[in-house]
Each structure stands twice: as structure tokens, then as C-alpha cells.
Image (cartoon, rainbow, N blue to C red):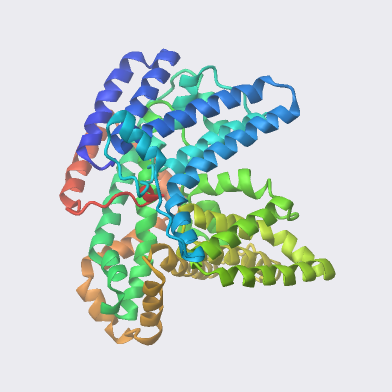
Amino acid sequence: MFTHLFFWGFFIIVLLVYALIYKNNKARTTFLFLTSLYFYFKTSGLFVLLLLFTICNDYNLGKKIAITNDAKKKKTYLIISVCCNLFFLCFFKYAYFFTQSYNQIIGTDFKFFNHFAQLSNSILNTHFRLDNVLPAIGVSFFTFQSLSYTIDLYRNKITPVKNVVDYGFFVCFFPHLVAGPIVKANEFIHQIYQPYKLNKQDFGMALFLILNGFGKKIVADYLAVNLIDKIFTNPNYYSGLEVVFGLFGYSLQIYMDFSGYTDMAIGIALLFGYRLKTNFNSPYKATSTSEFWKRWHISLSSWLQEYLYIPLGGNRNGTIGSYICIAFIGLIMVLLSGKIWLLFILLGLALIFTILFFSIKSFKQQINTNVNLMVTMLLGGLWHGSSWLFLIWGGLNGLGLIAHKYWQKISPFKNTSNLFVKFILMLITLTFISYTRVYFRSSDLETVNIIFSRIQNQFGLNLFFDILNGYAPVMTALILGYLIHWIPETIKIKYRTWFSNLPLPLMALVTILFVFFAYQLMSSEMQPFIYFQF
């Protein structure tokens, strides 16, 4: 974790060695590649072998894609790359789930057997359990990054890397390796061959991002320990109003936690001379669901748009791929329910939709122009985990995007410059996003039902001032967090620029004071970064 002193000791040693070799591109790339492998080994143990396989496999397939002129061979190599990457992603994230669901539906008693664990135990004398599978940390992130390389080569958007070390460095550069931001090949690989460049203002901005991310993480943990975790663990103990504060608190927590991580990742990468794209752009300033998803986890949203949504046909037309994805999502729903009768219900609905699709032109047009949006959001939900909760969360956000698409056509507030109207739209969007996150954060559907029941039946508005008084420090952090988030971007740019232009001795003093006070305020119950689990 970037908040641990152990990490900063590691980072300082790496930076000192890097200072001796940074002018030589080959030396710096090799060093950072080996350092990143060590970092991942310390994070995930023998899963480093999976990372190395992904690197070697996609490097060789990418090389074949680049040198062959045969279109069929190019496509074959790309399909192999996609299948290999998705196989390991699905195995480590969903294999145990598929086995359990199959047993529940068919009534069998198959025992899950982890062949990879057995191989590791027999060859490397490890002691992994054979009846379960541990998720490989960061597998979703480095899988998507590696896929972007072979796909971009197939599309002729990039030229191949010079050697496997350069490719390995692109895939596993340690700042973004385990929790993003997701780095696309066409955004990063060209930087490997550029000379190191870091002026004083860049250095100041990198340091600001690191400190800013560190501060966000501390506030996120404070909110989690003192309010959010308690409410989601035992919602029956709290009034509906407290639960509502918990929902808005969770929205702030997950933003500060995840954007704090990526701020630090971007700042650390910048010190090494590499520019990573911004991953969050004040998402709670969004006045619509569409705008929100352009501001939230931008690296994932843009990846899904470029490599899934647009290839499926975008908002123009549904394709065969779109309906294959729908069939896959339907299969997941059956597996999640563990009920074979749901399969027949879904097949019946599919038949009705097919009849309407081919008999009513307007119905066909509406389905075709919206199907890919819903498919992308549902698959985005399942990317987070094999659960009804994530599927419902993705579906609700898909419906939110479609509803906004139609609302735009009749909205009297489109392109409004009225600040009051924009503020109301912003609050509506934040409320919708926060309420959908009940499904994202809850451990099961029972918890979801209790939360909504408390809000609906036992709101307790009369307790408003008692709650403010009883949770005074937490509410202060919550309100200040949102107010700072809503500061106009022009003001944020000014204080970032002010810090990055400080004389180095003064910048060092401010940094030391900030770190000192931050560690005094740090919660003793440090939480893992939320997106490590994905």
C-alpha cells in the first residue's frame, strides 16, 4: 500500500538507483521492469508467474500480428490473445463461482480442483489449497492493458515494441500495476523510447499529486472506520437518516480512496518521467449520468468504450456480438440464481423480444441504439465480481444512461448556464449514483433490503440535529470533503500551480509538515485500497 512506510522506503531506494541510470533508455526500462516484477512478487507471490506468462504470450502474439500480411492469420493471432487473456481472467475471478453454480443447478457435487495450485505445490513446494482459487491481485488491470496492445497492433494504431523487456515494462510498471489507472498501449508505449524529461514544475506537480492522494486516503479511511463500515455491517442499528448519510459518505469514501490511489500512482510515475492519464475529473460535479461516467474511472470507461462499446456497434446498431453478450449475461443470471427455471423464463422473454424486434420497426430501432450501452454497463458490473449485486448495479447505471439519453431530447435545461439549475442537476445525479452504490457496497441482497427499509419506514428526520452533534467530526469531514470537491477547477489549478512553483526548500518544508500531520491523523485501522479486490 502506498500509505505504508515500507513502500516509501522501497520507493526511495528505487529512485536513488534510477538517478544513476535514467539517461540510458534501455537501462532504465530494464531496471524498472525488474523492480516492477519484484513489487508484484511482494504483493502477490507466485502470481508473478501469471504476469510473466501474459507478458511473454502477448509479446510473441503481437510480434506475429505485426509482421504477417495475411489478414486471416492476423485475426487468428488476435483471437488467441483475447481467449488466453479472458481465460485466465475468468479462471481467477469466476472459476469457483461457476463450479458452485453448476452444482446448485444440476444437483451434482463436483469439487473444485485448482490445477494451477497443484502445479505450484508440486514444482515449487508451495502449500496452496486445491479446493479454492485465490484472486490474482491486479489481474483485471494488467489483462486489459495487455489486450490493448494486441488489439491496437491489429488495428495498426501502434508499432510493436523493440523487445520483451520493453513490453513487460509497459504491462507491469509498478505504480499502476495493481489498481490502475488502466494504461492503453497507444497512450504509453511511445514514452518508453523518449528521453527522460522532468522540469521543476513537473516535479512539484508530481509531489502535489502524491500528497493530495495521501490526504484523500486518510479521509477515506476515517469515514469508513467511523461511519460507513458500521452502517453497512449493521444497518438495523441506525435510523434511515443515518443510513442516508452513510450512502453519501460511501460515495465520498470510494472517490477519495480510489482517486487518492491513482493520484499517487500518476505522481510516482511522473517522477520517473512517464505521464499517465488522469483517472478522475471531479465526478460529483457531473449534472447527468452520462457526464458522470465521462469523469469517473476514466481509464476503465474509455477502455470499455474503445474496445467493447464501439466494436459492438456503439449507439448506431446492435451486432451479432451484442446479442452473444446478452446471451452470456443471461447465462450468468441463471448461474447466479442457481435455478434452471430462470433459463426457460429468459428464453421465453428472448422469444417475445425477437418477435417484437422483427415486427415493430420503432421497437427494433430503440433496441438497436441502446443495446450496446446496456451490455457495456452490465459487463462492467460483472467485471467487478460474480454477484447479483454487481449485475444490478451495472444494470441500474445502464438504465440511468439510457434515461438521460431520452431526457436530453426534451430537457428544458440542456446546455443551461444557470448555476442554481446546474447545482440541482448535480445533486440529483449524485443522489442517483449514491443510491445505486447500495448494491455495490452491500454484502448481500438482505442488507440492501434492510437499508432501503430503514430509509423508507424509519427515516427519523427529527434526529437530524442529534446526528449532526453525535457525529460532529465525521460530518465535518464529510461536508468539507464535498465542498473541496466542488471547488471550481480554475481555483484548483491555481493552488496546484502555486505549490509546484514553490522554491525547493519551501516545498520540502511543506511536504514534511504535511506528512507529519497526516500520520498523526491516520486511522489505526488502515483500510486496503477498495479497488485491490477487483
Looking at this view, is 487 or 363 the one in front? 363
Name the quarter where the N terminus is drawn: top left
Would you say 165 lies left or right of 148 here?
left
The quadrant holding residue 370 is: bottom right
Q: Residue at x 49, y 67 (%)?
A: 338
Would you say 11 lies left or right of 376 here?
left
Q: Is residue 237 above or below residue 514?
A: below
Q: Is residue 259 above or below residue 119?
A: below
Q: Is residue 499 above or below residue 332?
A: above
Looking at this view, is 371 or 461 the one in front? 371
Decide if residue 498 is in sight here. Answer: no
Looking at this view, is 192 or 99 the one in front? 99
- Label tally: 0
Would you say 226 lies left or right of 194 here?
left
The quadrant holding residue 196 is: top left
Q: Residue at x 64, y 50 (%)?
A: 309
Residue 114 percent coordinates (x, y): 39, 44
Q: Is residue 209 above or below residue 325?
A: above
Decide if residue 343 is in sight here. Answer: yes
The quadrant holding residue 512 is: top left
Residue 509 percent coordinates (x, y): 21, 35
Residue 206 percent coordinates (x, y): 36, 34
Residue 259 percent coordinates (x, y): 39, 48
